[in-house]
Image (tube, grey):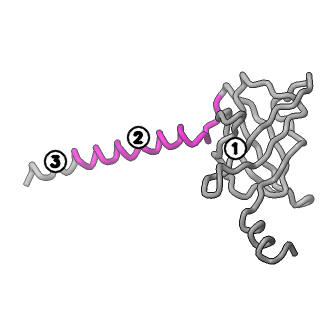
């Protein structure tokens, strides 16, 4: 009976160590941890449907950051999104940002399209040129309802 309790204790310790390992891995992969080699930007949208904290921020299809916060502005009823971008990436201040979709069944992400200005965005700046997410369900309902 003493051998069973030792074996059960060892197996329990292995299970707990594996669980801690998964939690640490999930924290690193999700992008929620801010790194020193990134800087924060923000943007306002009419709708951020489909994105959440940890969603990828991409430029030319390459992941360059992640969404770090979402909030609602009670005065304008707009969604405010904050996101981190790799510090090595200098973005012009006339860049565009939009909530894009990977396809009909794919997830959403934030896409940045660089502008042509000589002035670059700095830590904490807001990107003014935005495009909100398009709801596929609303488009289908308009099509089925005759465009009303």
- Residue mark closest to the camera, 1 vs 3: 1
- Residue 54 position by quadrant: top right
Q: Relative to residue 91, is residue 104 drawn left or right?
A: left
Tell me the number on the disc at residue 116.
Answer: none
Instruction: Tell whether position 134 is magenta.
Output: no
Instruction: Tell whether position 28 is magenta.
Output: yes
**Residue designated by label 2:** 21
Tell me the number on the disc at residue 7.
Answer: 3
- Residue 92 position by quadrant: top right
Give percent across and percent down for residue 121: 85, 29
In the image, what residue occupies the spot 81% across and 42% down? 97
Nearer the observer, 99 or 39? 99
Q: Earlier in the sequence, mark 1 or mark 3?
A: 3
Quarter placement of the C terminus: bottom right
Give percent across and percent down for residue 108: 67, 51
Give percent across and percent down for residue 35: 64, 30
In the image, what residue occupies the spot 77% across and 58% down? 134
- Please give the range of residues in magenta: 10-35
The local secondary structure at tag 3 comes to helix
Q: Earlier in the sequence, mark 3 or mark 2?
A: 3
Tell me the number on the disc at residue 67.
Answer: 1
Q: Relative to residue 73, is residue 58 drawn left or right?
A: left
Distance from the alpha carbon under mark 3 to that under mark 2: 21 Å
Q: Earlier in the sequence, mark 2 or mark 1?
A: 2
The local secondary structure at tag 1 comes to strand
């Amino acid at each position: 009976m003493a051998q069973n309790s030792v074996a059960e204790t060892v197996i329990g310790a292995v299970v707990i160590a594996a669980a801690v390992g998964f939690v640490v891995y999930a924290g690193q992969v999700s992008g929620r941890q801010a790194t020193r080699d990134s800087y924060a930007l923000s943007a306002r949208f009419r709708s951020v449907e489909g994105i959440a904290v940890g969603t990828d921020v991409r430029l030319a299809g390459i992941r360059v950051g992640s969404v770090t916060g979402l909030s609602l502005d009670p005065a304008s009823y707009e969604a405010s999104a904050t996101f981190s971008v790799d510090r090595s990436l200098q973005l012009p201040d006339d860049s565009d940002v939009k909530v894009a979709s990977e396809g009909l069944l794919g997830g959403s992400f934030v896409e940045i399209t660089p502008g042509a200005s000589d002035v670059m965005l700095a830590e904490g700046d807001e990107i003014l040129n935005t495009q909100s997410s398009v709801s596929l369900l609303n488009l289908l309902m308009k099509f089925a309802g005759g465009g009303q």
